[in-house]
Image: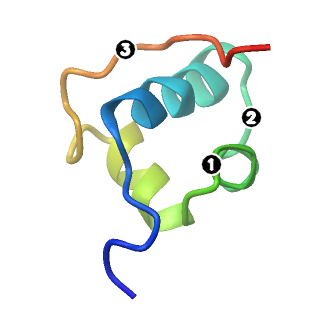
Amino acid sequence: MRGRFPCTFEMACYVLYLVEILGLSQTEAAIRVGLNVGSVNHVVHGRRHPTAYPVPLPS
């Protein structure tokens, strides 16, 4: 199943916004963005898309 829901740079930025700015849990952020929790964890800890920065979700 690898690559079915790829984590793009844009998604990584949304994840950081949800976790760091809004204070959501990694699980909640994963649900909102459509990624698995492992991918979100990698983004939050800088192992995937280390240059990502928090960006609000489009409305």
Q: Secondary structure at mark 3?
A: loop
Label 1 is placed on what type of residue?
Answer: Gln
Task: Give percent across and percent down for residue 23.
Answer: 72, 25
Q: Mark 1 or 3 closer to N-term? A: 1
Q: Which residue is mark 3?
A: 53
Q: Nearer the viewer, mark 2 or mark 3?
A: 3
> As rendered, which of 20 and 33 lies closer to the eye?
33
Which residue appears at 55% of the width and 26% of the height?
14
Q: Amino acid at mark 3?
A: Tyr
Disc 2, SS: loop
Q: Which amino acid is tagged 2?
A: Leu
Mark 1 → mark 3, Cα distance in angstroms:
16 Å
Q: Residue at x 67, y 19 (%)?
A: 57
Distance from Cα at disc 2 to Cα at disc 1: 6 Å
Residue 26, label in figure: 1
Residue at image position (64%, 44%) is 33
